[in-house]
């Protein structure tokens, strides 16, 4: 099971490290290995959240996620995305941007750094919306009850998450504008960039998330109706229609996963420039890390880990909220990537330990009522 799930990741790791040695010797080998570890540590929460979505998709779409999705993640976000950033910000055509990435690496790195406010605002707002929609939803199982109970009650207010996200964006953009004005106003236009990029991130979340949610509800309704028909007449006459609907639902959920992965990868791509400005080593290292994140997602789904450790998804969403805030803060202040990675790892580790404690308590109760599931974790 382990080899089947992680087989491609192991193969890509071997090929990537060998390619690194041929490209730049053992120094490149070390850089690529560090980048791979960086990507995995920064994106572990991504895998947990992805697993919660992927488990709703059938085996076919899980394979699509591991094939086409990997191509998008590795080549799209880890290789093409940095080039596109440079092309847009520097007003270059893509060919010139690629040439710049190889011919003038320092200039290339500077251009990507200049684009960071727009990247952080877009990704930060997208991730913040994911966290807010999760935390405002009333759930049967709660991890940090003293936080989640009152927030679930507040969540009954319509559009509250959107209002809070917009307030955060306005505060961030005006704070950035004030900071720029105090330094001569040379970058005051970037406040507008932050505002526009943040709104774009919010719109992207609402469109993709809304479509995936719509088709997911349609799929559930169709499955219930089909189940009733099978029980009554044992017929499968509408099976073809259900499969088509499942395909539509799975497509938009797949699209949602890709946008989610893109938002998660922002910090990895930007953080990679702190280690190297060589686009080849960056693509190799981050690509290897992305493969492990994908494999880990499928592993969590097939092992039923999220069902066994019920607080993991909570921990991952808290990590998403932390990452969203960190991205917004990095618009003005520099935050070490190690801190970013550790925040996510610590939150997920705490949620895992809380899940273990909960399972032990339930086992000790010897078949007692499920109310134990909502006992405060003590975190």
Image: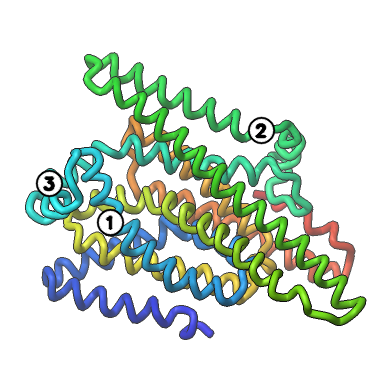
Q: Sort mark 3 into few (<14), some (14-19) or many (20+) by Cα contacts within 10 Å.
A: some
- Element under disc 3: helix
Q: Marks 3/1: CA distance?
A: 18 Å
In the image, residue 286 lies at what x, y percent? 31, 62
> Left of 366 or right of it: where is 305?
left
Question: Residue 204 versus residue 290: which sits nearer the camera?
Answer: 204
Q: Is residue 121 above or below residue 264?
A: above
Q: State the scheme by which the image is colored.
A: rainbow
User: Do labels 3 and 1 touch, CB within 8 Å?
Assistant: no
Q: Which residue is drawn at 62% across and 35% down?
A: 161
Q: In this view, does 72 lie above or below 60?
A: above
- Lower position in the chain sequence, tag 1 or tag 2: 1
- Element under disc 1: helix
> Left of 270 or right of it: where is 1?
right
Q: Sort mark 2 into few (<14), some (14-19) or many (20+) by Cα contacts within 10 Å.
A: few
Residue bearing mark 1? 80
> Left of 339 or right of it: where is 47?
right
- Element under disc 2: loop
Instruction: Give the number of the disc on residue 23.
Output: none
| Camera-nearest label, 3 or 1 | 1
Residue bearing mark 2? 159
Q: Sort mark 1 into few (<14), some (14-19) or many (20+) by Cα contacts within 10 Å.
A: some
- Lower position in the chain sequence, tag 3 or tag 2: 3
Residue bearing mark 3? 106
Q: Residue at x 85, y 77 (%)?
A: 230
């Amino acid at each position: 099971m382990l080899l089947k799930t992680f087989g491609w990741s192991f193969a890509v790791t071997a090929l990537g490290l060998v390619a690194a040695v041929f490209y730049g010797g053992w120094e490149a080998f070390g850089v690529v290995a560090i980048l791979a570890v960086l990507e995995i540590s920064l994106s572990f929460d991504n895998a947990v959240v992805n697993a919660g979505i992927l488990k709703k998709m059938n085996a076919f779409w899980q394979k699509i996620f591991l094939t086409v999705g990997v191509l998008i993640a590795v080549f799209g976000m880890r290789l093409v995305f940095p080039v596109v950033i440079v092309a847009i910000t520097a007003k270059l055509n893509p060919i010139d941007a690629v040439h710049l990435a190889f011919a003038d690496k320092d200039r290339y790195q500077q251009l990507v750094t200049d684009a960071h406010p727009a990247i952080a605002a877009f990704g930060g707002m997208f991730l913040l919306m994911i966290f807010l929609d999760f935390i405002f939803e009333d759930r049967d199982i709660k991890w940090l009850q003293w936080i989640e109970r009152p927030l679930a009650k507040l969540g009954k207010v319509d559009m509250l998450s959107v209002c809070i996200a917009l307030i955060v964006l306005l505060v961030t953009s005006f704070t950035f504008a004030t900071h720029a004005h105090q330094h001569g106003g040379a970058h005051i236009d970037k406040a507008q960039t932050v505002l526009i990029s943040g709104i774009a991130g919010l719109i992207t979340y609402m469109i993709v998330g809304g479509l995936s949610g719509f088709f997911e509800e349609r799929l559930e309704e169709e499955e219930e109706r089909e189940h009733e028909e099978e029980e009554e007449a044992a017929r499968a006459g509408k099976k073809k229609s259900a499969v088509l609907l499942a395909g539509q639902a799975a497509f938009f959920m797949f699209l949602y996963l890709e946008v989610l992965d893109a938002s998660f990868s922002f910090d990895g791509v930007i953080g990679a420039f702190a280690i190297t400005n060589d686009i080849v080593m960056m693509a190799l290292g981050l690509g290897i890390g992305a493969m492990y994140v994908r494999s880990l997602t499928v592993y969590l789904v097939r092992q039923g880990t999220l069902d066994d450790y019920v607080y993991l998804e909570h921990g991952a969403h808290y990590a998403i909220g932390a990452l969203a805030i960190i991205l917004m803060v990095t618009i003005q202040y520099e935050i070490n990537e190690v801190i970013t990675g550790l925040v996510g790892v610590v939150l997920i580790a705490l949620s895992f330990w809380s899940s273990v404690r909960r399972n032990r308590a339930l086992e000790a109760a010897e078949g007692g009522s499920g109310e134990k599931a909502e006992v405060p974790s003590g975190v």
